[in-house]
Image (spheres, rainbow, N blue to C red):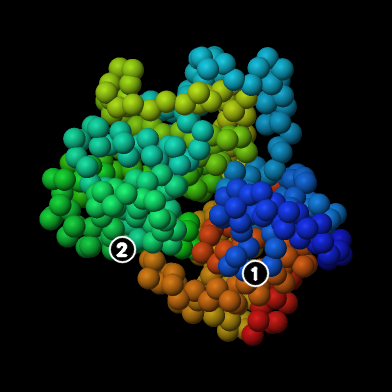
């Protein structure tokens, strides 16, 4: 097999930039996810990302499995998406007023997701979830929100209050008091909580596939049972598909598992790399938003023409069945290869996955919930991460965050990655 990555140089420029940026930006990063605190070492600074490859400031090339934390399902800088954005860029970045592209994008999304009769665009997944929770409270007249331990729904007060793995000072106690935490994949615990607090619960908010305690695929009856319980107690079911939307299925995890939420939140993969978020549901629920209802949400850059153009082209490309067929084939090749290596050698590592999402989980047993995720061997992952980094493969710098494969990864790149992984496992054990 031909080598697909050139030999690596040192990363001195990245190290210098990390030190310089730390003097001007807290921690040297503009998002905590980018830090190398868990795996050690300095962050890598990149100058270019094309297809399945990213290139750092020291001239090193990497096969990428971070996918910019999700948007690069079609690869980085897909030429059709870039051209679509460039065509409208010359006419203005933002109007602060409606444009025709909003209508076209709304049609594309509502056609792709059967549970969406109406949608509203925002600028990030955090905004989408924050707005959906407020809408659920406005519609039901209730305050409490049920979430699941280990889930991540952005950095708004209403959702961060629930996130044990990303706890924060500065979140008012009142916000936390309206949050109820339940164990993921534990339908009985959810039923018990709703039996006690059901009349006060505005919504149940869930990642249909959890992506921040490695990758946790729901048990067979978990999502369907959740749907039944929400209907019984009059709570809205909100799917946070910021990670799963347009990655595991054209219609998201709800399309894959055939479970219909009341509201759905999107981000990341919705517009092929443009900053975007969206949330939507039935016309009856969405009509509670201002200006026709009484629930407020706004955004100057929401629905801007450049982002809309990128999103329209992204949905058009993803609507081709061959894209998800390729994603499934590449995922099967990669995960199947990893499992063969681990099984043959008896390595205590799991490879949870659903289509484009996957994890490399250093645990002897499968992870089903947050408590299980605490047993992940983060030190072993750190060694693995840096071995792969030196060999030209880039993974999430965290043992608990989902990685992803793209539709443009080649079979040769995957075979190369498998060979490097095999060597890395040998070094660890």
Residue 102, position as x, y percentages in the image: 51, 20
Direction from residue 319 to residue 234 in the image, left or right: left
Q: Which residue is mark 2?
A: 183
Dot 2 surroundings within 10 Å: few (below 14), some, or many (20 or more)? some
Name the residue: 66% across, 49% down: 24
Q: Residue furthest front?
A: 23
Q: Is residue 60 above or below residue 286?
A: below
Direction from residue 278 to residue 270 in the image, left or right: right
Residue 70, position as x, y percentages in the image: 57, 48
Asked whether the beta carbons under mark 2 and mark 1 sit within 8 Å of each other, the answer is: no
Direction from residue 60 to residue 221 in the image, left or right: left
* Residue 429 seen in the current view: yes
Seen from the viewer's position, the closer of residues 405 and 272 is: 272
Q: Which residue is mark 1?
A: 40
Helix, strand or loop for disc 2 = loop
Q: Is residue 244 above or below residue 420?
A: above
Q: Earlier in the sequence, mark 2 or mark 1?
A: 1
Q: Is residue 140 above or below residue 397?
A: above
Name the residue: 54% across, 14% down: 100
Residue 287, position as x, y percentages in the image: 30, 23
* Residue 230 seen in the current view: no
Q: How many marks?
A: 2
How far is mark 2 from mark 1, CA to CA?
30 Å
Helix, strand or loop for disc 1 = loop
From the image, state whether disc 2 or disc 1 is nearer to you: 1
């Amino acid at each position: 097999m031909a080598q697909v990555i050139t030999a690596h140089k040192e990363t001195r420029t990245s190290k210098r930039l990390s030190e310089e940026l730390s003097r001007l930006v807290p921690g040297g990063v503009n998002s905590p996810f980018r830090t190398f605190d868990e795996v050690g070492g300095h962050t890598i600074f990149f100058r270019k990302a094309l297809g399945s490859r990213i290139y750092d400031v020291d001239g090193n090339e990497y096969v990428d499995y971070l996918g910019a934390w999700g948007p690069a399902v079609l690869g980085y800088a897909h030429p059709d998406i870039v051209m679509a954005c460039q065509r409208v860029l010359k006419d203005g970045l933002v109007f602060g007023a409606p444009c025709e592209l909003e209508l076209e994008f709304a049609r594309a999304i509502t056609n792709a997701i059967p549970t969406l009769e109406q949608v509203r665009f925002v600028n990030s997944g955090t905004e989408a979830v924050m707005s959906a929770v407020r809408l659920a409270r406005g519609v039901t007249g209730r305050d409490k929100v049920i979430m699941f331990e280990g889930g991540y729904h952005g950095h708004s007060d209403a959702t961060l209050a629930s996130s044990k793995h990303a706890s924060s000072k500065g979140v008012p106690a009142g916000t936390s008091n309206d949050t109820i935490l339940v164990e993921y994949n534990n339908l009985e615990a959810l039923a018990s909580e709703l039996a006690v607090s059901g009349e006060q619960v505005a919504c149940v908010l869930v990642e249909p596939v959890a992506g921040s305690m490695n990758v946790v695929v729901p048990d067979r009856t978990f999502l369907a049972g959740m749907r039944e319980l929400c209907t019984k107690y009059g709570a809205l079911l909100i799917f946070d598909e910021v990670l799963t939307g347009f990655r595991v299925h054209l219609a998201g995890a709800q399309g894959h598992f055939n479970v219909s939420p009341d509201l759905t939140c999107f981000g990341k993969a919705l517009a092929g790399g443009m900053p975007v978020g969206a949330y939507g549901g039935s016309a009856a629920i969405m009509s509670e938003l201002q200006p026709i209802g009484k629930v407020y949400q706004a955004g100057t850059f929401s629905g801007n023409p450049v982002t809309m153009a990128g999103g329209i082209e992204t949905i058009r490309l993803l609507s081709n069945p061959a894209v998800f067929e390729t994603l499934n084939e590449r995922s099967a090749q990669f995960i199947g290869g990893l499992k063969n290596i681990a099984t043959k050698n008896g390595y205590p590592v799991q490879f949870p996955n659903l289509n484009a999402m996957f994890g490399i989980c250093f645990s002897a047993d499968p992870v089903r919930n947050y408590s299980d995720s605490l047993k992940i061997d983060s030190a072993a992952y750190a060694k693995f991460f840096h071995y792969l980094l030196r060999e030209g493969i880039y993974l999430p710098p965290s043992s608990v965050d989902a990685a992803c494969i793209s539709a443009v990864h080649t079979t040769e790149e995957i075979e190369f990655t498998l060979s490097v992984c095999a060597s890395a496992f040998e070094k660890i054990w």
